[in-house]
Amino acid sequence: MTESGETRTQSSEPIRVLIVDDHELIRRSLALALAAEPDIEVVGEASDGQEAVELADRLMPDVALMDVRMPKQDGIEATKGIKASVPSTRIIMLTVSDEEEDLFEAIKAGATGYLLKDVQINDVPAAVRGVHEGQSLINPAMAAKLISEFANMSRKEAERPPQLPVPRLTDREMEVLRLVAKGMNNREIAKQLFISENTVKNHVRNILDKLQLHSRMEAVVYAVRERMLEIT
């Protein structure tokens, strides 16, 4: 699922990656896999969330591979910290957990991707590239869990008093956002609305600009929270 029309060019700098995991063996395996890629550079490693936030602030990585369960500060809190200090960093949660709560909290914290640790190590470079290019890295099973959580959130938020006025989206932008909330990718949305994929990308980019957010899933969370969307 693409969040913007941005693409990398052949002449661009290597993707700068920060690896965060409390297991040295996992960090080493990830570093070796990424170091073999000419367009990716591992700029740092951290063994806990607190160290990750400090390194990210200093190194300003393009992408962070972030474990969820860590000492001192977990990956969810570290993600919040990194997104606050270096908003441009895209974060992939790398974990053994596929629990709905962890997934939902990671997305709310600002994560752009979510990979289980049983993923093939050779698939990680492609995941880094995809997220750096603006894709949300969430498999269909996880997307289904997110939709379920959005529905629960929608029901809970119906009881909350309205907050400040929210930015207004066009009718077409709302159509696109509703389909994003259903877990559709750009190609599926384009087919559903009889428009081109590039047009979908433009609508998504406009939505994120108006809401001042960084990812599609953040936009859905925001829209549900502010009662722009109701998911059943």
Image: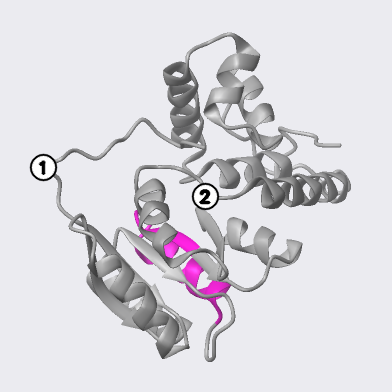
Q: Is residue 161 above or below residue 173?
A: below
Separation (CA) of disc 2 from disc 1:
25 Å
Q: Position of residue 22 (x, y in %)?
A: 47, 87
Under tag 2, what secondary structure?
loop
Residue 83 visible? The answer is: yes
Determine contact: label 2, label 1, CB under 8 Å.
Answer: no
Residue at the spot of label 2: 137
Residue at the top extreme? 194
Q: Position of residue 87 (x, y in %)?
A: 38, 56
Under tag 1, what secondary structure?
loop
Q: Position of residue 211 (x, y in %)?
A: 52, 38
Q: Amino acid at mark 2?
A: Leu
Checking the image for residue 114, the label placed there is none
Q: Residue at x 52, y 68 (%)?
A: 94
Say whether disc 2 or disc 1 marks the residue closer to the N-terminus. 1
Q: Tag 2: Cα neighbours inside 10 Å, few (<14), some, or many (≥20)?
A: many
Q: Position of residue 134 (x, y in %)?
A: 40, 42
Q: Residue at x 38, y 52 (%)?
A: 126
Q: Residue at x 49, y 29 (%)?
A: 204
For the C terminus, the quadrant is: top right
Residue at the spot of label 1: 11
Q: Is residue 137 magenta?
A: no
Q: Amino acid at mark 1?
A: Ser
In front here: 42 or 159? 42
> In the image, which residues are magenta?
74-92
Residue 169 visible? The answer is: no
Q: Is residue 135 above or below residue 169?
A: below
In front here: 171 or 93? 93
